[in-house]
Amino acid sequence: MQTHFMKGSPMKSNVGNLDRTLRVLVGIALLSLLYLGEGQLRWLGLIGIVPIATGLMRFCPLYSIFGINTCNRDPG
């Protein structure tokens, strides 16, 4: 298992590579609404920060709550 930031940190990776890539791509698409959207819709694009952050940190708090882990598991 990998930990992030400091040793002993409770944040263990629970976002796998495919999940990570999809999160970053969706986040970028949502952030593009800031430039492409009109009116109040454009501010909805700020939600894109969340999937980008969770993808880059490889940690999703909701996955922890529900016990989900998309990282590759060690065989055996």
Image (spheres, rainbow, N blue to C red):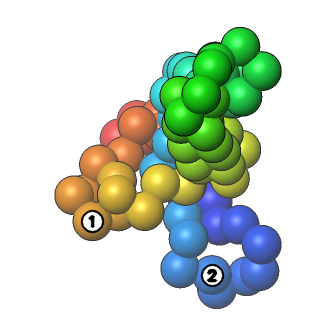
Q: Check the picture and name the quadrant holding the C terminus.
A: top left
- In depth, the one of 25 and 29 nearer the eye is 29
User: Does residue 36 appear in the picture of this structure?
Assistant: yes
Give the residue drawn at x 56%, y 71%: 11
Mark identifier at residue 65? 1
Please tell me in which quadrant of the rendered image residue 48 appears.
Answer: top right
Nearer the observer, disc 2 or disc 1? 1
Q: Please, what is the three-letter code of the amino acid marked with disc 2?
A: Ser
At a point 40% along the width and 37% down the height, the residue shown is 70
Q: Which mark is residue 6?
A: none
Horizontal placement of 69 versus 66: left or right?
right
Residue 10 % position (x, y): 53, 79
Q: Secondary structure at mark 1?
A: helix
Per the image, the residue denoted by label 2 is: 9
Marks 2/1: CA–CA distance: 16 Å
Q: Is residue 25 among what the camera can see?
A: no
Residue drawn at x 54%, y 64% as measured from the top left? 12
Residue 57 lies, in percent from the top left, at 68, 53
Query: Is disc 1 surrounded by few (<14), some (14 to 19) or many (20+) residues within 10 Å?
Result: few
